[in-house]
Amino acid sequence: MKIWHGYGSEHSSNLVMIGHFKTAEDAEKTQKLIEQLTKGLDGKIDIGTSRDRFGDDVLDFLREINCYGLSPSELEQFLYDISTKVEGNKIILTTEESEVSAFFKLMLEKGAKVELYSAHDYPEAEYGRGK
């Protein structure tokens, strides 16, 4: 009999990121930018493909939507399984992924104060998977 020992990751961080904006309008504009990036990058990049440069089509798209603060390696995060919603002046992002630097940078760039936590460690918090 063979016993195999290995390490596996199941992407179960139950991560919550809340961007607190000064106005509801700022939150809505940022949400729309996240949606634009998610839709616009679909088909232009592949998850898991290492990249250190923007392709011409991606660069043209980023110029079109006036988005300059993200690195080529962060763009695939917009293709991950995430959920976002706007509540007043807040954007609430939930995901099982731990790589969320693109969203963090985007929210900071748009003027948000950002709160980030694992709902596994804070089950009493208002947001997270199962809430």
Image (cartoon, rainbow, N blue to C red):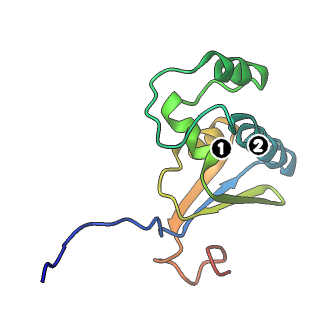
Name the image quarter holding residue 125.
bottom right
* Image point (69%, 27%), residue name: 67
The residue most toward the right is 25
Residue 92 disc label: none
Type of the residue with mark 2:
Thr
Look at the picture and state if 31 lies above or below 2: above
Q: Name the residue under label 2.
A: 30
Q: What element carries label 2?
A: helix
Type of the residue with mark 1:
Met
Question: x, y percentage for residue 131?
Answer: 68, 80
Q: Earlier in the sequence, mark 1 or mark 2?
A: 2
Count of numbered labels shown in the rendering: 2
Assess disc 1: are there few (<14), some (14-19) or many (≥20) residues with their C-alpha within 10 Å of its C-alpha: many
Answer left or right for 58 relative to 96: right
Look at the picture and state if 3 lies above or below 99: below
Residue at mark 1 to residue at mark 2: CA–CA distance: 7 Å
Q: In this orientation, which residue lies closer to the viewer: 111 or 28? A: 28
Assess disc 2: are there few (<14), some (14-19) or many (≥20) residues with their C-alpha within 10 Å of its C-alpha: many
Q: Is mark 1 on a helix, strand or loop?
A: helix
Question: x, y percentage for residue 25?
Answer: 87, 46
Name the image quarter holding residue 26.
top right
The image quadrant where one finds the N terminus is: bottom left
Look at the picture and state if 89 lies above or below 3: above
The residue most toward the front is 1
Q: In this orientation, which residue lies closer to the viewer: 82 or 127? A: 82
* Image point (43%, 68%), residue name: 10
Residue 107 disc label: 1
Question: x, y percentage for residue 18?
Answer: 65, 59
Mark 1 and mark 2 residues within 8 Å of each other at the beta carbon: yes
Question: x, y percentage for residue 102?
Answer: 57, 41
